[in-house]
Amino acid sequence: MAKITFPDGFVWGAATASYQIEGAATADGRGASIWDTFSATPGKVLNGDTGAVACDHYNRYPDDIRLMRDQIGLDAYRFSIAWPRILPQGDGAVNPAGLDFYDRLVDGLLEAGITPYATLFHWDLPQALEDRGGWPHRGVVDAYINYADVTTRRLGDRVKHWMTFNEPWVFTFLGYCAGIHAPGKTSWADYLAGMHHFLLAHGGAVPVIRQNSADASVGLVLNLNWADAASDSAEDQAAVARAMSFQNNWILDPLYRGEYPADMVALYDEAGIMPEIRDGDMARIQGAPDFLGVNFYTRLVVRHDDSVEILRFSDVPQSGEHTEMGWEVSPESLYRLLMWTWQNYAPEHLYITENGAAFADEVSADGAVHDERRLNFYREYLTNVHRAITEGVPMRGYFAWSLLDNFEWAEGYSKRFGITYVDYETQQRILKDSGKWYAQVIENNGF
């Protein structure tokens, strides 16, 4: 196999999210989030698991920083900030202890030579804001901008890479339409209103962050979708276009073109579910981020399906290797998605902000975790990232998902995505073979 070398200055990192790893759910004045409420509701999360303790990162972050530095050699660490730690009621009184925690975390990262990449929102909306209507209620926009202001005024002197949101399609569609994530609602209208309000919140927060964090790079993280057609039929080809527009263009078009995609607008108008768009909204939303973060795990293979309301497509299961999440391993799809994104929207910089796989890991008799399938997954997906770079895509870095095994949302602790094994009973960390391989990749800037 030929040696693959990445460009000089390519950023190698790993990613986590606050509710998935921090624990300490009621410590030091933290307010409740919608995920505290949702996971405590019987039947919502597998095995009744919650993030109340998770990986206890809130208390063990110095050890986790040493793991990043000494065992993996990370250039950068992507973490998210828990809104309920900063503003327990979503707005109003600031909780100093919450800001203090992220102060310590950021300082510890910088002392270890690790660049912090901070995500302001990774799904853990304060429950108090949900009680007032959540993302479908326009009042959340100003609350988010205030939260971004408070947080970046405190940390913006040291954190110079900010992401406003993580995977808005997930927290709006799965949370407010499909009902399988917090807060568990099932309304198309709520989903679309929530999506519009996320875009307004992003657009309103970007200038605030730039004002508070001099010379900062401000981006956005999307779980963009790649879809292939189940057949060559015209109907299935049209279904692919709808699938891509539904998840990708619905966010990218407002950001880069100042308008929603016409094909989706027609479908939503016909169904009577288009959100309220006020004068000036689209101008407030439009503006290319300094960088676009892409989270990618698998692809869809779609066919036309009249039984599916509004979208009229369904996913066709494929043979071949799948992860424990039931997701097809499809590394070339990442290359195709990166090329499509670059060719259609020309983002200035791109990062892979999440990429990884869940497998059934076990600690072997020798005390190690031999996760060869995950190691191969990373090798194949990174090969396709490199392929995109060689064809001109302006990739600036890659963040493995995840640094640690953690609370996997509705799947609880049943799925392990980490390059580090976590024994949830003892909180022992064991760097897996994939993590050891990734450390070598970082050291050599390639493989």
Image (cartoon, rainbow, N blue to C red):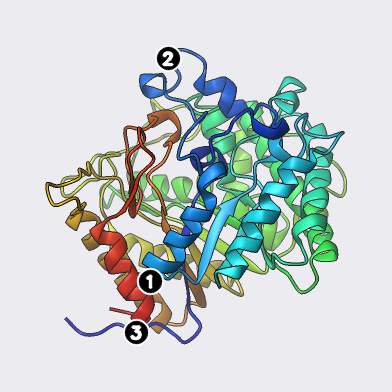
Residue type (three-letter) at the residue carrying disc 3: Thr
User: Which of the 4 image quarters holds residue 405?
Assistant: top left
Q: Position of residue 239 (x, y in %)?
A: 40, 44
**Horizontal side, residue 57 vs residue 219: left or right:** left
Label 1: few (<14), some or many (≥20) within 10 Å?
Answer: many
**Horizontal side, residue 257 vs residue 343: left or right:** right
Q: Position of residue 196 (x, y in %)?
A: 71, 41
Q: Position of residue 272 (x, y in %)?
A: 66, 27
| Residue at x-position 47% and y-position 54% | 64
Residue type (three-letter) at the residue carrying disc 2: Gly
Q: CA distance from mark 2 to mark 3?
A: 47 Å
Above or below, 150 against 139 in this view is below
Q: CA distance from mark 2 to mark 1?
A: 39 Å
Contact between labelled residues 3 and 2, with CB atoms less than 8 Å apart? no
Residue 52: numbered disc: none
| Residue at x-position 18% and y-position 57% | 372
Q: Earlier in the sequence, mark 2 or mark 1?
A: 2
Q: Which residue does the numbered mark 2 point to in the structure image?
A: 43
Q: Which residue does the numbered mark 1 point to in the structure image?
A: 385
Quarter of the rendering occupied by the C terminus: bottom left
Q: Which residue does the numbered mark 3 point to in the structure image?
A: 5
308 or 151, which lies in front?
151
| Residue at x-position 66% and y-position 55% | 104
Foreground mark, 2 or 1?
A: 2
Residue type (three-letter) at the residue carrying disc 1: Val
424 or 278, which lies in front?
424
Above or below, 129 against 2 in this view is above
